[in-house]
Image (tube, rainbow, N blue to C red):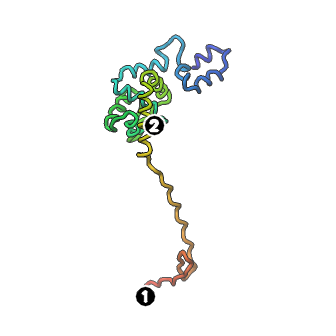
Amino acid sequence: MADRAAGRPERPLADLVAELRSESDRLDALSMTGDEAAAVRGVFSWSYRALAPASARAFRLLSLYPGLEPSVPATAAIVGTTPSTIRRLLDGLAGVHLVEESGRDGYRLHELVRLYAAERVREEDSDADTDTAIRRLITWVPAHRRVRRPRAAAAAPASRPGPGARGDAAGVRRPRRRHGLV
C-alpha cells in the first residue's frame, strides 16, 4: 500500500483510504500490480486450494456469519453438521491459518480472510445453498441464544441503628442482645 501511494504521488491518499473502506475493493486495494503472488487474495488462495471439499465449504459458509468470531455450535448450524464434525473442520482451517482458535468454543476470522471467504461463497455456492445456510443460522439463534439476565442491584447496606438498639427494614428497634447473661 505504501509502495502504491509513493509510486503515484498525484493520486490523493483519500482515494486509497476509500478503496480500503470498501469491502468489495479491499482485497484489490491490497494487491500489487503485476505481482499476483504477493497479492493478499493470492496468498489466501494457496491455503484455500489445499482444502478438502468439506473444509472449503465450511470456510466459505463461515463468511455468512455476521461477525468475526463464530462459535462452534453456530458454525455447525450454518454448515448443517454436528459440533464435533465442525470442530474437526475448523481445526483443519486453523492448521492452514485461515481461522484461529479463540477460546474454548470459538474461532476467529481476520476481516480480510472473511472477505476472501465471502468472494468464494458468491462464486462457488448457489443462492439456494447460501439461503439455506442463512436460514439454518436464523433458526438456530433464538433456540440457543443465552439470555442475559440483569444482575440484581447490590442491596444497600442497612443503616446502623443507634447504640442500645438494632434496627430492621421497617425501622422497628429491637433491644440489644446482652452477652453473658443466662
Residue 167 falls left or right of residue 141: right
User: What is the residue that sits farthest to the top in this orientation?
Assistant: 34
User: What is the residue that sits farthest to the bottom in this orientation?
Assistant: 182
Q: Which of marks 1 and 2 is nearer the N terminus?
A: 2
Residue 21 falls left or right of residue 70: right
* Mark 1 Cα-neighbour bin, 10 Å: few <14, some 14–19, many ≥20: few
- At x 54%, y 19%, the residue is 28
Residue 11 numbered mark, or none: none
Q: Is residue 15 above or below residue 143?
A: above
Residue 181 numbered mark, or none: 1
Q: Which amino acid does label 1 sit on?
A: Leu
Quadrant position of the N terminus in the picture = top right
Q: What element carries label 2?
A: loop
Residue 69 numbered mark, or none: 2
- At x 54%, y 20%, the residue is 30
- At x 41%, y 33%, the residue is 133
